[in-house]
Image: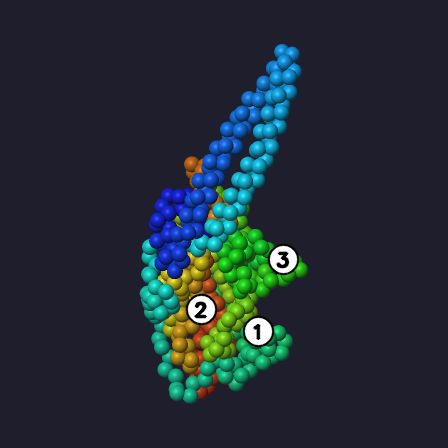
Amino acid sequence: MLTLQQIKENPAYIVERLAVKGFDGKEAIEKILNLDTDRRSTQLRNDNLAADLNRKAASIGALMKQGKRDEAEEAKSEVATIKEEQKAIAAKLAQIEADIREILLSVPNIPCEMVPEGKTADDNVVEKTGGEMPNLPADALPHWDLAKKYNLIDFDLGVKITGAGFPVYVGRGARLQRALIDFFLDEATAAGYIEIEPPYVVNEASGYGTGQLPDKEGQMYFVNEDGLYLIPTAEVPVTNIYRDVILNADQLPIKNTAYSACFRREAGSYGKDVRGLNRLHQFDKVEIVRIEKPENSYAALEEMKDHVEGLLRKLGLPWHILRLCGGDMSFTSAITFDFEVYSAAQGRWLEVSSVSNFETYQANRLKCRYRGEDKKTRLCHTLNGSALALPRIMAAILENNQTPEGIVIPECLRKYTHFDIID
């Protein structure tokens, strides 16, 4: 969440930047500032009472020694009255703090200056394009037909076992899926990321820490009896490793990678764009997460983009990078770049990665800080990216690499699949 200091320093700027995300923050920011004014005046009253209490308490003993019992009793009564008022003030301060936090949690992160204005995905900016477009015949099959033809993925069996959006990978389809996971993890490890194997369920505090709660509560699967949430991405458990942690400056940067299954309700998703692997309730993904000093985070963001681009180059897929406009960004992000690959048989671009810098927004929720050489603690910057999400990568590989002889496996995966073609 935004820090109170950010808001107090330049409230007009905060409101202006929130508008780029299509969020009218004027009322919320005014409420926060008014509550903070009330908090400071209430705290001042409490401080004055504490000083008065100390004086009164100190006088009681002296009055008793002087034999001024009545005055001592009167002082005791005044001390009791002060303590009662302090209790009321403490309750008021706690309520003000809770009210400020509740409003702050409802306010999204402000987009950085590099974010283009716009309301929808149509306003996103294509920043870079690469890879060679495949030249497929007119009768080329979409991946759901290829999966059935070669017995790679059984969508109907997933419906039988669980429901729509939970496919079953079979034989060489399962092997290709595992090959992609191993490839992505090995590439991340080679780039200096430390592998983490996280839990697939998290508590409420973790959901709030990375911003899934309360913003995306309806999109997460919830285990009611235990108060736990199935993770929508490994970003959530991995970033929460550093919740309520003060790091030393020499520990930064922290670079983690993790494979996990991801669970998303995708409420309201329907139509042609959800067919096959295009939109699932459960899917596999390899994530990269970084904890950085603020002055280094944008260089780290470029490194992460280069890493994802390198993966797509090695897979031989046509790709482009989109700089998301304000209206298409997530609640928590300060800037996001989406990577999309071209699905030749479907004739459309498929998102396979989002790489984001959250600046201090997540870190403030997490209380993730570092101690500098001056011994002062400061909020870290957090970043994360998909490297990569598997379903649409799998779809593009199957569709773009189909030949009359079968589906050709990208060379970088063959040491993992131990086969060169699916025929």
Image position, residue 223 (x, y; %): 63, 62
Looking at the image, residue 220 sits to the left or right of residue 315; the answer is right
**SS state under label 3:** loop
Report which quarter residue 308 is drawn in. Answer: bottom left
> Where residue 35 sits in the image (x, y, percent)?
46, 43
Among numbered discs 2 and 1, the one appearing first in the sequence: 1
- Rendered image coloring scheme: rainbow
Mark with earlier residue (3, 2):
3
What distance separates the C-alpha of mark 3 from that of mark 2? 30 Å
Question: Nearer the observer, disc 3 or disc 1?
Answer: 3
**Does residue 77 appear to the left or right of 339 in the view shown?**
right
Please identify the residue farthest to the top as the structure is shown: 66
Q: Residue at x 57, y 73 (%)?
A: 166
Tell me the distance, in whole angstroms, between the alpha carbons under discs 3 and 1.
Answer: 23 Å
Name the residue located 49 percent from the left edge and 83 percent from the top edge. Answer: 146
Residue 99 seen in render: yes
In terms of sequence position, does the residue under pointer 3 or pointer 1 come before the other? 1
Q: Which residue is mark 2?
A: 352
User: What whole-number distance in Å separates the C-alpha atoms at marks 2 and 1?
Assistant: 18 Å
Residue type at mark 2?
Val
Q: Residue at x 54, y 67 (%)?
A: 264
What kind of element bears circle 1?
A: loop
SS of the residue under disc 2: strand
Q: Which residue is mark 1?
A: 166
- Mark 2 or 1, closer to the camera: 1
Question: Is 129 placed left or right of 141 in the picture?
Answer: left
The circle on residue 227 is 3
* Residue 169 % position (x, y): 57, 76
* x and y, in percent, of residue 208 in the image: 53, 54
Looking at the image, which residue is at 58% across and 80% down? 156
